[in-house]
Image (tube, grey):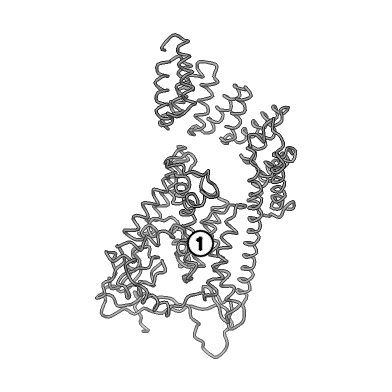
Amino acid sequence: MGDRPRSLHRLRRTIPRAMDSCTPRTTDRAVSIALPVLPSAAAPHRASFGSRRGWVRAAVLAGVWIFMIGHLVQWLAIGTTLAPIEPSESMQTVKDGIITVGAIFFAVALLSTALLGRWFCGWGCHWVAIQDATAWALARAGIRPKPFRSRLLVWMPLCLALYMFAWPLFYRFAVAPWIQPDLRWPGFTTHVMTQDFWATFPGLAMGIPFVLVSGVMVVWLLGSKGYCTYACPYGGFFAPVEELAPMRIVVDHDRCHACGVCTAVCTSNVRVHEEIKDFGMVVDAGCMKCMDCVSSCPNEALSFGLGKPAVMIDRSASRSAAAAERRWDLSWAEEITLALLGVLTLFAVRGIYIGVPLLFASGIAACTVFVTWKAWRIVRDPSVSFHGIRLRLKGKVGRSGVIWIAATALLLAAVTYVGVLNGITWLADRADAQVTLPAEYIFSTDAQAPDAAMQQSAERALRLYALVAAAPEGWSIIPAGWKQVDLRRAYLSAAIRDMPAAERLVRNSWERDGADESTAAVIGRIIRSFLSRSADAIAWYDEALGAHPEWQRLREEQVTWLDQQGEYARVIQSARQGFAARPNDLLAMRRLSLALVERGTMPLEIDEGVELIRRTISMAPDNGFAHAALARGLVRQQHFDEAMAEFGRALELEPNSEVIHSMFEEAKAQRGAAGSGG
């Protein structure tokens, strides 16, 4: 074996290095040596193995990312685009009956999985691309993460999927009739196009840690596709649906020589050689049809073809025998304890104070389970290693082991701390929910103090929110929650008519956390609540929007208030500034067009408004209110015949709108008074 062929692939397994003498080792680091996989003389089809599909799949996954980036760029350039093609958008469908692009996409992916298996996970998922890139980079660094094998944690994806997609339906139809009888199913609507593409996605402050934890660290700790195995809620549905698929990785037993290459190259952590031996095909729901095993088989024994659905195969005997031989990483006591830890971690970090997305929280929970388990093993076992680093050797904890235990303690302390903040915030929100006064009333000039019960709830919520306010006033050292807490405190302070405290809170937030549209809106509302401060309110809106002309929601609030104040020239001026800041934005275009048509005093202004409305209709032709607005403009131009036609179109689209009917009757009266058809 000394003259080993260069073409012979070498597998590496971490084992202690052979000693030259009986002198004890002085290093804490294990050393890897190469173990050859000998080719079978009866099957000389390939001199070496290695996936020939890897770069093809990498190119496909790169194409997925290019498409996603192109989708984002198109929205930024035009302002309107196809709604996110994201399975999580299906939550809007099951919760509110809104059929989204993401829901349609998820349904198609599930149906195709029932035929082809989990091909989408392997070839179409952008998150698999990140995990595979991480695994590739680790391999280049000489690290091949060992799959973490847990019997209970593997159920977390299904539980998350049921929580996301089944619980809303169960609550609405089985629970709500008893505790919330006024909650009715709204019926189905569609949402295909959007102007706010990024509304349901996290910002960079959350997105970057999300990628690092759920795309990188999860692979380093749990093995290749660790997120798919232990944290992905979509996989929670893909896995059971895959059981129905007739298309599978199948084996030609005449060619198979049980060399184990298929298992060695599988990046989905499937024990392919056991599956094909026992069942003649791969039945493991974790198989993502990456085809690495097919392209790597030195005997060309594997292929993707027609087989029997896994749900029809009795796997009990073979699986029990395999389980007896296989060594799970966790004992049953550890399984139960760490499963409980995973659930608690998920709820602790998922809470509303920081607003960690569920898909991020699941990744944190999975990583926390592994890190804690490894720390426990350092304490319990005489020898423990991680990627070749000896954490403990023959009863002696090395420096790396001490660092691991310390890091675990800090991690658990951080999770506990965040859980406490989230728990207090949850209690505060429950008290806050009892204060049912609308913001329009609270910040109006004629608002009154609430009744005694509501006053008590507001004061309780204020005390609890104060605990999670920014340190040193409160306990929070996490900036992510400071602004929202102070905005709620300002709302409650205003509700109990403590307006100076409300203004102090939001202005402190403005100075500490930076300029923010929602904070600017609350400051404006507080100033407007004083009849004597109208000039201050005008100045505040001008200052905020002058610095941030892109803030369309604040501008809408300003324009509405100015219109109520009779400041029509300022209404048109502000609407023009908003349109200039975002000339392709449909909302900005509608705002200016309505301001010109309704409040314009010169024919040129009305003409400009009518042309802008025609542009909005070309962008959204099925908006009945846009046709009604166009009709109003045509009436002001004395084009009554065309106006009546537009009102007819508006009523076709919105037949039950009392507002449009009222406009129509008013226009007919104006036409009669004018004594002319246009």
In this view, the residue farthest toward the left is 254
In this picture, residue 334 sits left or right of residue 432: left
Circle 1 crowding by C-alpha within 10 Å: few under 14, some 14–19, many from 20: many
Number of callouts in the render?
A: 1
In this view, the residue farthest toward the top is 675
**Relative to 180, residue 258 above or below:** below
Q: Quadrant of the C terminus?
A: top left
Q: Position of residue 179 (x, y in %)?
A: 55, 49
**Relative to 357, residue 636 above or below:** above
Residue at numbered disc 1: 216
Q: Residue at x 63, y 51 (%)?
A: 480
Say which of 27 and 204 sits in front: 204
**Relative to 203, residue 500 above or below:** above
In this picture, residue 216 sits left or right of residue 315: right
In this view, the residue farthest toward the front is 178
Q: Is residue 142 visible?
A: no
Q: Is residue 391 visible?
A: yes
Q: Position of residue 66 (x, y in %)?
A: 41, 50
Say which of 323 and 81 sits in front: 323
* Badge 1 amino acid: Val
Say which of 487 and 196 sits in front: 487
In this picture, residue 495 sits left or right of residue 342: right
Q: Position of residue 83 (x, y in %)?
A: 44, 43
Q: Position of residue 613 (x, y in %)?
A: 46, 26
Q: Residue at x 56, y 52 (%)?
A: 206
SS assignment at label 1: helix
Q: Quadrant of the N terminus?
A: bottom left
Please identify the quarter of the rendering in which residue 520 is found.
top right
In this picture, residue 493 sits left or right of residue 170: right
**Relative to 51, residue 179 above or below:** above
